[in-house]
Image (tube, rainbow, N blue to C red):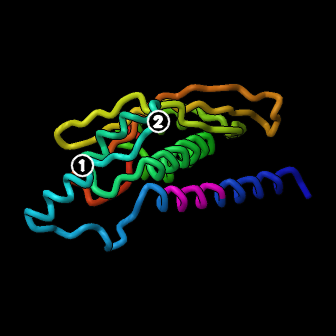
Amino acid sequence: MQYGDLQFFDIIFFAGVAAFLIFRLRNVLGKRTGLEKQKKSGLERKENIIKEKNVPELDDNFVELEKIYKLLDNFDHKDFLDGAKIAFETIINAFNNGDKKTLRNLLTNETYTVFEKAINEKNNDPESQIFSLNIEKIENVLIESEKITVKIKFVSEQFKNNDESTIIKKEDMWSFEKLIKSKNPNWVLSST
């Protein structure tokens, strides 16, 4: 077996990992199931608004998410946080591997342009891998007239060349956004 054969298997392996992560991301961040709430009468809507105000108790680091509970039907902070972690890993891996197709679906146009330029200038690092990842805090939730933006502080440990002795700790502040009235349940990365 030649060294080039190993690179081919690495590419296939990472393509499989990327496909799996995209599948999981879609499942966690959401998809239309046909079971979304139908329009209700005025009385039913008023009752639902009162019920929706019953926000679950959130850890101090995630209390900002209360704003989204009061605005969006079917919002679940646990699913959102899990989806944000999957999105982080998927985006980092796609960027490091120069996978622009995967990035296109997960980023706003402006953010995609920045990532694409970095890939074109070879500023990505295919040898970098994520060792661990945590969401430290929801820094803020900004609600504008048409969209919601959530700023998340991620803390990750990353290493290179499969050498865990090179682990470095990184803190990243990423913002995800979603149009309030959009039927699409997915959030996209709007800034890093």
- Label 2 neighbourhood size at 10 Å, few (<14), some (14-19), many (20+)? few
Query: Could you tell me residue 192's position as x and y percent?
Result: 45, 31
Badge 2 element = loop
Bounds of the magenta span? 17-25
Tag 2: amino acid? Asp
Q: Residue at x 75, y 34 (%)?
A: 160
Image disc number at residue 180: 1
| Left or right: 125, with 73 as reference point | right
Res 184 → quadrant:
bottom left
The residue depicted at 62 percent of the width and 38 percent of the height is 133
Whether residue 50 is in magenta: the answer is no
For disc 2, the marked residue is 59
- Residue situated furthest bottom in the rendering: 34
Q: Quadrant of residue 16?
A: bottom right
Dot 1: what SS?
Answer: loop
Closer to the chain start, of discs 1 and 2, is: 2
Point 26% across, 52% down: residue:
52
Badge 1: residue crowd in 10 Å (few <14, some 14–19, many ≥20)? some
Q: Is residue 62 above or below residue 77?
A: above
Please identify the dominant SS of the magenta region: helix
Work out which residue is located at the far right of the displayed protein and give it.
Answer: 1
* Residue 179 shows in the view: no
Residue 142 at x, y = what percent? Answer: 28, 33
Indicate the amino acid at tag 1: Ile
Residue 47 vertical placement versus 93 (above, below) = below
Would you say the residues marked 1 and 2 are in contact, meaning their CB atoms lie under 8 Å apart?
A: no
